[in-house]
């Protein structure tokens, strides 16, 4: 007697046989064994972030000590949160600095650097205004076709909230973005502010020979608190000699991005103050060390803005 075997059935039987004979684990991926995460075992490695969180109270939000990056929060007694800039006036003989802040934590080192810089410019006779993006509920999102083409091509009416911000930019001689380093890119509110506010038709437009910048004479600067960029305080040339090659690599990358953002608008990029060295929260000499960091920032601002402080 002749038996006719269904080829599909035969393939299934063969696969089952191979699976059993090779002792493959069903929890693993049958095609590429690395594409499934194996079940936890007693000797499995513990991720460093998990270990850190467990040591500092699990997933409870931090108070005066940052549970993950221990240097990003200023202890309560050293904070400068009472200071507020005076804002812009209509005076015709004043130079103005606009700060655009992207950090919900007013206890952070990022905020402290912002306050230090605002005080610096007010002490030099500049008018200073702060746009605290998260505190003022700025909308960074572009969610409609109309909003997309307004930001990209200048079509349609300018949204009312964008008009307000463009008014601040028009008045300012210097625009300083203050932010934490967020995976080596702008945080969401900063990115959304740049896209929605610095639109075509406001900051640049098309000319007979290509793009024409519409914000001549204004400067562009960034203050950024970081966790690891090779360790330095400032920009290119300001390495603390811990890992100068890595520091210069990061500074070059940021310079390329910042130059591109500024040049197309006919602005001048003055660079960045990147802080990659902050005292630990529980350091007994924290007060002395945070004041030293503030002093470094003031020195860097005096150098980077030298042409405008005369």
Image: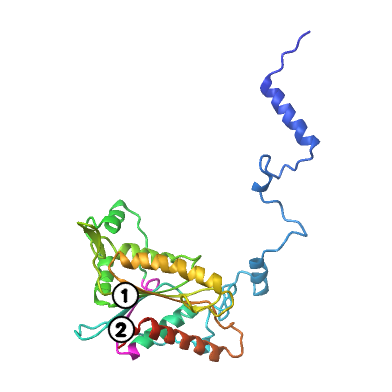
Is 75 rendered above or below residue 201? below
Residue 226 shows in the view: yes
Mark 1 burial class by Cα count in 10 Å: few <14, some 14-19, many 20+: many
The secondary structure type at the circle numbered 1 is strand
Q: Position of residue 215 (x, y in %)?
A: 25, 70
Asked whether, in this view, residue 163 is left or right of residue 118, the answer is: left
Where residue 44 sits, quadrant-wise, is bottom right
Render colour scheme = rainbow
Where residue 307 sits, quadrant-wise, is bottom left
Label annotation for residue 41 = none
Q: Position of residue 202 (x, y in %)?
A: 24, 64
Between residues 266 and 84, which one lies in front from this camera angle? 266
Question: Which residue is labeled 2 in the image?
Answer: 308
Q: Residue at x 45, y 84 (%)?
A: 297
Q: Residue at x 61, y 86 (%)?
A: 283
Is 308 rendered above or below residue 154? below
Q: Are marks 2 and 1 in contact (CB under 8 Å)?
A: yes
Is 40 rendered above or below residue 89? above
Q: Residue at x 55, y 76 (%)?
A: 231
The secondary structure type at the circle numbered 2 is helix
Confirm whether the magenta stretch covers residue 134.
Answer: yes
Residue interval drawn in magenta: 122-136
Label annotation for residue 219 = 1
Asked whether, in this view, residue 186 is left or right of residue 168, the answer is: right
User: How far is disc 2 from disc 1 in space, using C-alphas?
Assistant: 10 Å
Q: Position of residue 98 (x, y in %)?
A: 32, 77
């Amino acid at each position: 007697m002749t038996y006719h075997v269904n080829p599909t059935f035969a393939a299934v039987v063969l696969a089952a046989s191979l699976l059993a004979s090779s002792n493959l684990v069903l929890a693993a991926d049958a095609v590429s064994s690395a594409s499934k995460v194996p079940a936890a075992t007693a000797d499995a490695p513990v991720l460093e972030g998990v270990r850190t969180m467990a040591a500092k109270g699990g997933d409870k939000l931090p108070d005066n000590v940052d549970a993950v990056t221990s240097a990003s929060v200023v202890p309560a007694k050293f904070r400068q949160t009472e200071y507020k800039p005076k804002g812009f006036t209509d005076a015709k003989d004043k130079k103005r600095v606009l700060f655009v802040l992207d950090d919900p934590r007013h206890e952070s080192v990022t905020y402290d650097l912002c306050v230090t810089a605002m005080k610096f410019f007010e002490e030099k006779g500049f008018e200073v205004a702060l746009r605290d993006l998260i505190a003022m509920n700025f909308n960074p999102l572009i969610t409609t076709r109309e909003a997309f083409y307004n930001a990209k091509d200048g079509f349609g009416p300018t949204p009312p909230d964008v008009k307000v911000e463009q008014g601040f930019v028009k008045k300012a001689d210097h625009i300083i973005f203050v932010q934490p380093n967020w995976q080596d890119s702008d945080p969401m509110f900063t990115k959304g502010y740049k896209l929605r506010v610095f639109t075509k038709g406001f900051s640049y437009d098309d000319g007979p020979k290509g793009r024409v910048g519409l914000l001549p004479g204004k400067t562009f600067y960034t203050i950024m608190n970081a966790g690891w960029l090779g360790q330095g305080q400032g920009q290119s040339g300001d390495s603390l000699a811990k890992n100068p090659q890595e520091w210069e690599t990061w500074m070059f990358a940021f310079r390329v991005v910042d130059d591109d953002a500024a040049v197309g608008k006919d602005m001048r990029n003055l660079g960045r103050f990147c802080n990659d060295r902050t005292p630990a929260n529980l350091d007994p000499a924290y007060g002395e060390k945070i004041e030293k960091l503030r002093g470094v920032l003031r020195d860097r601002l005096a150098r980077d803005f030298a042409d405008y402080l005369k």
